[in-house]
Image: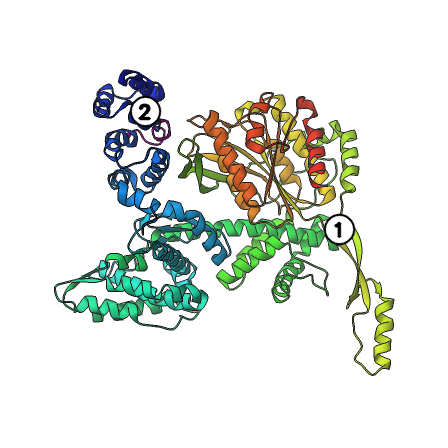
Amino acid sequence: MPTLAEQKAAFYRVVSPSRPNEWEVDELFAGLAELDSESRELLLGQVPAIWPVSHSLCYAFLSDAPQAMPLLPRQLLPEWVRQLLAAYESRGLYGAREFMAAVDRLFLGPLRGEAGVAFSALAPLLRSYIQGVAGRPLELATGPLPATDGRTIYLPETIDLLPEKAENILLYKLLVSLQWLHAGSPLFTELALAGGDPFAHFPEPTTARDLFAVLRFQTVSATLSETLPGLARAATGLVRRLIAELASEGPPDRCHALRRLLSEVVPPRPASDCAGDRLAELATCYARFSPLPGSYRLGPCALLLGSFDFVRAGEVIRQRREEQKNRFVRMAAAFLHRQTAAETPDAPAAVATADQDAALLLLTETTATKRRQQHRRLENEGTELPAELAALIAELSKEFGAVPANYLQAAVGMSAGAGPQRGDGEGGTADAEAPPAGGCAYPYDEWDFRRGGYRHHWCTLYEKPLSPVQSTFVSATLEKYRPQLRRLRRQFEMLRTSRRLVRRRRYGDEIDLDALIEALGDRAAGRQPSDRLFFRQLRDERDITALFLIDMSNSTEGWVGLAMKEALVLLAESLEVVGDRYGMYGFSGMRRSRSDLFLIKDPAEPYGTLVRHRIAAISPREYTRMGPPLRHLTRRLAEMPGRVRLLVVISDGKPEDYDDYRGDYAIEDTRRALLEARGCGIYPFCITIDRQAQEYLGHMFGRGNYIFVDNVLSLPARMAEMYRLLTS
């Protein structure tokens, strides 16, 4: 085994770029000297996983871990370190040291099957459970008390209150369900958007906050009994035991009053429940409660009540609504434009614009009919909303009662300026209304293979539109590749939808003779004849959604970047022929705090002048951190319709960033992001021109899920041909 001096030298090699203080290292190794060489080697082997996260945590680990080694089986050390890093990221250095000090209670006890349950062990189950209950993915994270901001639900890092492990797991399910009901209530949204602290004007704000939490628990408990009756019945005894944990200091009057309130059964609130009524109820309850003598300690009952941060929730809700609005305006504008163009295909833009009021009526009427007929094809109009737009309209209608008028007006205005820009010419200016500048921020986890776990909310991705530039690039590309484009269009035309006859329709193209003869026979026999006497020609639609992720790092400067842009032009022109849903995004970034995703074409956006000018604007930026954009587009694709969903990456090199995102770390995080995509039913594929790709692409994407283009000049045609092969 290595000597202490050799181990110390190896430690310096691992941490050398950061230049640690020698006296601190000497002090650490003086403590480690008491361990045998094998134990020291095991502890020092965890330094590469801990040091990049926090130098202070690494020093604390090497200082505190020797006391835990007699209790800790050697094979469990990596898992202990993984949970230690999760504790640090959720509760800081203090929480991490607390975790190390209680190795038997917080780590070994749950592994032995004792009562305690760790959030990190239960998180996958809870995420699947709440997504199934809510019908949409929700973020889960750790916090001191259960809480929610409308997008993320926060839960304790460990629960060991109850004697049985199954009971503690049930408590986790109950807490996440209660917070989901809080987030979905109109009262929560109203108070969050009102701004300020609704309890600040009470003489005892903390007491008022607790009473509000008690009253909300009454309401959500009643809703839980209606929504999830099985869970409510299973948790009844558990809830009673936690309520019984309320303790009094001095006279028990306040404690008894809280117990009565928590045990009181109330009917579910009506949908019109408003903040004014509930705050008035709180004021009445406070006036009765505050004169009572004594004090109380919530104890474990605080888990049932949770905590409320309406200021933070307001920020999240406003951001989510802005994202909803932008998505709706883009998708609805594309729908309105297609409908108007279909009705007046040869009309000039001015005439099409004049018909926008009629198109708006078509959208709203179609939406109402779609809800009544559960998204089936409209037999009387033959008009069908895209599934993603219909789902978004249902979501907006549930939140606002109807799609807000200003959303519809914005969609109409955008559709007026999104006229069809087909053909080979490039003239004209950008569309009348470009998306706003700036971007929305999204936090994402990052996989650290050294610890075998995620760094929670480690990266921040900003999605923003790529500013268009007026250029002749697209027209020049179309001229340059005219023969290849003609051949590609013919090939893509063969992938178009096929037609089939659907019989026995109330409305249709021609009379269905079989149905007519049968109806005449029924009439002659004195029976009521059917009115389904026609047949219609329907098309079997290609149900494909594809998102293309284009590397915009600084290594793409020159011929590589030019070939990528030309490839996008040929691909877009070919996809317009076949009619698949597709979107295009570029990515670049600098460090984990700024990963940029540039919108080139939204899947609901028409391929017109604005998109062409964005393609022309693609240019080299900074570095190649692939994990965040892959996870973001996976989330977008998971919310989109499509029997086949593709995520195609076009890059010229391996993932790398300015910080420690390089080598095995970057490759393993990218591989994990791709595995997450496959787990969502998405098929990732890579097209690369990196000559060293064979070394890592097979590991990241898997065999058969990538191609290597050795001649950059052949990239445009190869890319379009590869898409055709993937979807045919």
Q: What's drawn in magenta, residue-wise? A: 48-56
Q: Quadrant of the N terminus?
A: top left
Work out whether mark 1 precedes mark 2 in sequence or the reverse, and give the earlier one.
2
Residue 266 placement (x, y as % from top left):
35, 72
Residue in view at x 25 percent, y 31 percent: 66
The answer to which of 362 and 82 lies nearer the viewer is: 82
Mark 1 residue type: Ala
Helix, strand or loop under label 2: helix
Helix, strand or loop under label 1: loop
Above or below — where is 516 with respect to 439? Answer: below
Residue in view at x 70 percent, y 25 percent: 714
Residue 615 placement (x, y as % from top left):
62, 34
Residue in view at x 24 percent, y 33 percent: 64
Which mark, by number, is residue 212? none
Q: Is residue 459 left or right of residue 704?
A: left
Q: Is residue 709 left or right of residue 439?
A: right
Residue 665 visible: yes
The residue under label 1 is 347
Q: Quadrant of the C terminus?
A: top right
Counting labels gives 2
Q: Quadrant of residue 26?
A: top left
Q: Quadrant of residue 365?
A: bottom right
The residue under label 2 is 41
Please rate how many residues cluster around mark 2, counting C-alpha atoms within 10 Å: few if below 14, some from 14 to 19, many from 20. some
Above or below — where is 697 with respect to 502? Answer: above
